[in-house]
Amino acid sequence: MTEAIYPDLRGKVVAVTGGASGIGAAIVAAFSHQGASVVFFDRDEAASQTLLAELGENVAFQHLDLVDLEQLNHGFNAAVEIFGPFDVLVNNAAHDDRHRIEDVTPGYWRERMAINLDHHFFAAQAVIPAMRRKQKGSIINMSSIAWRVGLPNAPAYVTAKAAIEGLTHSLARELGPSGIRVNCVLPGFVRTKRQIENWLTPEFETTVFASQCLKRFIEPENVAAPVLMLASDCASAITNQTLVVDAGWS
Ligand SMILES: NC(=O)c1ccc[n+]([C@@H]2O[C@H](COP(=O)([O-])OP(=O)(O)OC[C@H]3O[C@@H](n4cnc5c(N)ncnc54)[C@H](O)[C@@H]3O)[C@@H](O)[C@H]2O)c1
């Protein structure tokens, strides 16, 4: 795939949560190719080390579990000490486990919110003060078309993904006067390793192609590309928006 070059992203400091694999890894690689300094936060040590070995010295990794908000705070502060304040935050980490309505306990529901929603707010809270001081910043939240099309067997995940779009609107309105843009990306079905291993049956492939306007798979790089655009000054007048990357499904 041909990658556009955004000269203003060179030297920018970028945080990506869940950057070790899937869409997050493609986002980390894409910012790295732009010459940005990228720090990704993930709990998967092995996948993170593999990605680090593939990319250049402008990429760093902080091992942390984003569910632990104290760890999150320490990790972001430690990264700022090394690289300086963040210009861009991509809130990407999630875990799309399936669950039947009758099996969901209060504890499981809370756990799903912690893994799919809470850290989006707290990562933003960690980067906002420095962005305010610079009067500039871009926050990109990863939602999903799952909540627009009503993905079955995942009500907690789908609820969290809907909330992320609401959070985007709230932060965009509040942070706009400080020059901070906040946008949301809604991918459709993206052919990541985890999706292939868990859900990409021949039957589901038929559903995907029947639902999409475009009869092809979306690859992680196809989501990373518009994330770069939203992070760059090319999108300097774009905030409070949702960009759907679903090959025309929804
Ligand atoms: N793949 C798709 O089809 C698809 C579709 C719509 C939306 N999305 C969204 O895109 C984003 C990326 O999805 P993906 O498919 O690449 O996911 P993935 O499962 O392939 O990768 C998620 C990454 O986040 C990390 N992670 C998860 N929980 C974590 C935690 N508590 N602490 C630290 N790291 C953690 C994982 O280790 C992994 O590296 C998610 O927000 C997801 O909801 C994906």
Image (tube, rainbow, N blue to C red):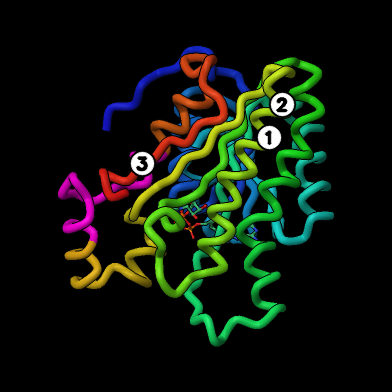
128 and 166: which one is in front? Answer: 166
Q: Where is residue 98? Give x, y as percent.
A: 47, 74
36 and 125: which one is in front? Answer: 125
Q: Are marks 1 and 3 in contact (CB under 8 Å)?
A: no
Tell me the residue at 44%/45% (across/down): 186
Which of pointers 1 and 3 indicates the residue nearer the eye? 1
Q: Which residues lie in the magenta part?
A: 208-223
Residue 216 in the magenta stretch? The answer is: yes
Q: Where is residue 123? Give x, y as percent.
A: 72, 43
Q: Badge 2 is on which residue?
A: 175
Which residue type does callout 1 highlight? Answer: Leu
Q: Badge 3 is on which residue?
A: 245
Q: Are marks 2 and 1 in contact (CB under 8 Å)?
A: yes
Residue 213 in the magenta stretch? The answer is: yes
* Disc with the residue nearer the chain's start (3 vs 2): 2
Disc 3 on helix, strand or loop?
strand
Quarter where residue 178 is shown: top right
158 and 12: which one is in front? Answer: 158
Disc 2 on helix, strand or loop?
helix
Label 1 to label 3: alpha-carbon separation: 22 Å
Disc 1 on helix, strand or loop?
helix
Tell me the residue at 18%/49% (across/down): 216
Label 2 to label 1: alpha-carbon separation: 6 Å
Q: Badge 1 is on which residue?
A: 171
Circle 1 crowding by C-alpha within 10 Å: few under 14, some 14–19, many from 20 = many
Which of pointers 3 and 2 indicates the residue nearer the eye? 2
Which residue type does callout 3 highlight? Answer: Val
